[in-house]
Amino acid sequence: MTLPRPEECASGFNTPDDVEKSVGSEFGRFDPQKRHLFQIEIPNTMFTPYLYESLGIEIALTNAEIDTIFWDAAAPGAATGGVEDFLKFLKKREIRTGVISNISYAPSVVAARINRLLPENAFEFILTSSNYIFRKPHRRIFDLALEKADLRPDEVWYISDQYECDVKGALNAGLYPVWYIGAIDLPYREDRSILTVTDWDALKPLIAAGP
């Protein structure tokens, strides 16, 4: 994408600021609180074409390529400490794993990042709300994961860091929730009724012992 020179903008060209304003006015209608309330995802593959085409901007990239460039610039991401060893521990014990993610980026982009950050993972599937409409804590996305894994809810531990979406969602779907707080950098309220761990190593003996 070639950006216009400042003097061209008065003739109707759009600047990055124009794009940002449009994002705020249009996508702002679907802010995180509303998406959590309705538990429905707005995929970038739907919003991005509207955003740019409504501003008369043509980008010679696929939606996935746009997602990748934007996400890598906005939040490069990193694996949390100890998670690679933890996944190796699960693999060695032949404990199956999968991913359920609330995210608006394209499924292929999410999978590519996970596989880049955790190249030795053995995830059987990576489910994203961007591909299946429903956002956690909606029960349907948990049920879909159970269907894909061919497992009953009481056979599955669900480990994640977001209380409202992950812990409550897993509970509602009948899974055994584990609240990982080792990467939380915001204030949170403790829930002593939920198994809570601060690092991945602490989970190993607990998993070996069972719920």
Image (cartoon, rainbow, N blue to C red):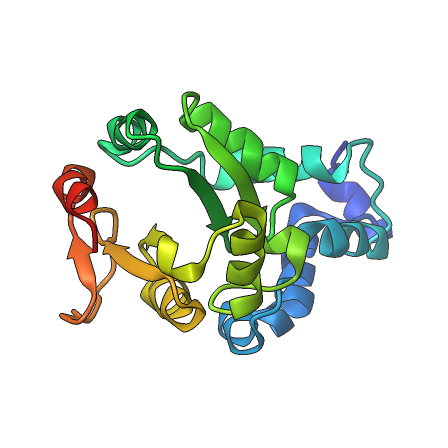
- Which one is nearer the viewer's eye here, 101 or 145? 145
Q: Is residue 43 visible in the rendered structure shown here? A: no
Horizontal arrangement in the rendering, residue 171 relative to residue 150 (left or right): left
**In the image, residue 186 lies at what x, y percent?**
25, 60
Horizontal arrangement in the rendering, residue 149 relative to residue 109 (left or right): left
Point out the residue furthest to the top here. 120
Q: How many callouts does the rendering have?
A: 0
Q: Residue at x 80, y 56 (%)?
A: 50
**In the image, residue 88 lies at what x, y percent?**
30, 25
- Which one is nearer the viewer's eye here, 100 or 55? 100
- Residue 12 to residue 40: above or below: above
Quadrant (top left, top right, bottom left, bottom right) of the C terminus: bottom left
- Residue 10 to residue 87: above or below: below
Q: Residue at x 25, y 26 (%)?
A: 85
Q: Is residue 118 visible in the rendered structure shown here? A: yes
Quadrant (top left, top right, bottom left, bottom right) of the N terminus: top right
Horizontal arrangement in the rendering, residue 170 relative to residue 196 (left or right): right
**In the image, residue 113 lies at what x, y percent?**
51, 31
Horizontal arrangement in the rendering, residue 56 relative to residue 186 (left or right): right
Q: Residue at x 41, y 37 (%)?
A: 96
Q: Quadrant of residue 20?
A: bottom right
Q: Residue at x 34, y 33 (%)?
A: 79
- Which one is nearer the viewer's eye here, 177 or 36? 177
**In the image, residue 194 lies at what x, y percent?**
21, 66
